[in-house]
Structures are given as C-alpha cells and as structure tokens.
Amino acid sequence: MYKVAILGTGKMGSAMARELVKADVRLSLWNRTKASADSLSDSLESNLVTVATTVSDALRDADIAICTFTDGKVTQSVLLSDPSILEKAASNLVIVDMGTSGVEAAKALSYSISTTGLRFVDAPVSGSTATIAAHQLLVMASGSVDGIEVIRPILEIFAKKVVYLGEAGAGQAMKLAVNLIVHSLNAAVGEALALTTKFGIAPEEAYDVLEESVVAAPFVKYKRSAFLDASTPVAMRIDTVVKDMGLIRNFGMSSGVSLTAAWAVEDLYRQACAAGFEAQDMANLFRFLR
C-alpha cells in the first residue's frame, strides 16, 4: 500500500486523512503550524500516522503527496522555496495539488516539478468535508497521465469520480468555472433572502420555497443550515471567496473572456470583507446584505 504525505491539515486535508486511515493507508502529516498536524494525528489514534517536522521529512519515503492549501502561492512556496525538498524525494513521488491554486500556479508547479523528474497532478475538487466523508467528492484532474493512474486508487477512497481534463492547469480552469457558479449562486441566494425578509417573509419560509423551486441545486440544499443559522460552522470563508474571484477575474482577462457577472459578484464579497465579514462563512453574505 502506498504511503501518502498530506501537506496541509486544515478542514479538507484532515477530512481526507480520516478516510485514508480508515482504509489502512500509511500517512505522513505536515502543516505550517505543527500543532495542527499533531492535533489531527492524536484524533486519528492510528499507528499508521506520523507527523513530519519538515516538508522534506514528509516526502522522504512517500509515494504520493497531497497538497490542500487554499492559496497557490503557498503551495509553490512550500514545495519550491528550497530545491533540496524535491531533490531528496523518492523518484517515484507523485505530487497532487488539490487546492484552488489557479491556472498559472498549476502551470508553474507542473514545470518546476517535472524538471526534477517527479510527476505532478493538478486535481482541485468540488465538494466539502461532508462530501469527503460520504465518499462523494468530484476530482477535476489534469497533468501527468501516468501520475493520475497512480493516485486514482487513493483518491477513489473518498471521491465518487476522478475526471481527467488534459494538461496541467485544465483542472484549475474547470474548478474556477465551477466556483464562478457556486459563488454567484451563493450571492444570488443571499440577495433573494434579503429581498424576501425585507418584505416580511420568514427566512425559513423563503428557503422552503427555494428548495422546492427550479433553483434547488444541491448547493442550495446543503447550505440551508449555513444561511439560516449563523452558528453553523464555517465551511468557506468570505475572504477565501474573494481570493477565488480574483483568480477567476484574472483567468478571464488572460483568456480574453468578458466576465461581467464575476466582477459584480467579486465586488459584493469585497464589500462584505470590508464590513468585517471576512472570516465568516460565505452564506453570511445574506446577513451582510440584510
């Protein structure tokens, strides 16, 4: 069985680690704040799990490295800031970036990693921690074809499907397209609730109607609690949405595609950040609007 290094033990990395341990996969955990990796290791209570002090230690005898950072610049810094990190890795290592890093970051990572003889897979996802636990994650993969075949059995432990889209960066392009719809839909639901509650309709009643209407996408259904209960744990922060929208805007500009709706949606989330909502869940855009 492969040994997997998980770089980044936040919500998504931790959720993946839990499912991999259940499948008896050996894990090496690393996080920029070591206390986070230690805490995750303690909660997993498995002798299959070790915590690495450095990135080099995490990669030393790993077959697969899964990166789950929310920012592509962080991923590049972690992997590329010191050339010895990749030089000391096993020659069969496949590095997988599962964060929303952006197209340019994916291309840069692919180039730098491939020059060392290692394989790189750009594999952002559609889903959440709950989706991982239910083994229903969608993986949008691109990059090394044989690398994808190596990692597929590991990813399919918690994913319902791994889609191959082409050269490195294609996965990020698809993820940004998905997130453009997700973030726009979230903004539309927030504005719709702000409108209906202003008229006097209770938020719960308005949401009941949305769930029975033609706009009842899976996102609308599983975000109900977040929209209606401010104490629901944060799944995606508003400042993370702003980061995504910036990547989407830049991708559109570099591609020569006019993204009129994206600019307006990004501006709305930026206003929420400026008003102090940056660390709150994206559904709290509704409370900012109200």
Image (spheres, rainbow, N blue to C red):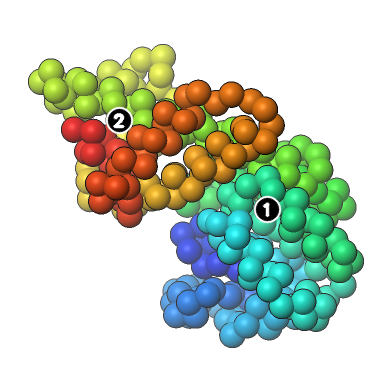
Q: Nearer the viewer, mark 1 or mark 2?
A: 1
Q: Secondary structure at mark 1?
A: helix
Report which residue position mark 2 lands on. Answer: 190
Residue 126 is situated, as x and y percent measured from the top left of the image, at 56, 41
Report which residue position mark 1 lands on. Answer: 105
Residue 151 is situated, as x and y percent measured from the top left of the image, at 76, 56
Residue kind at label 1, given as amino acid type: Ala
Residue 190 is situated, as x and y percent measured from the top left of the image, at 30, 30
**191 or 93, which lies in front?**
191
Residue kind at label 2, given as amino acid type: Gly
Residue 286 seen anywhere in this rendered image of the structure: yes
Q: Residue at x 75, y 51 (%)?
A: 107
Q: Judge left or right: residue 4 versus residue 34.
A: right
**236 or 20, which lies in front?**
236
Quadrant holding the C terminus? top left
Quadrant holding the N terminus? bottom right
**243 or 48, which lies in front?**
243
Name which quarter of the figure residue 174 lies in.
top right
Distance from Cα at disc 1 to Cα at disc 2: 31 Å
Name which quarter of the figure residue 177 lies in.
top right
Residue 280 is situated, as x and y percent measured from the top left of the image, at 31, 50
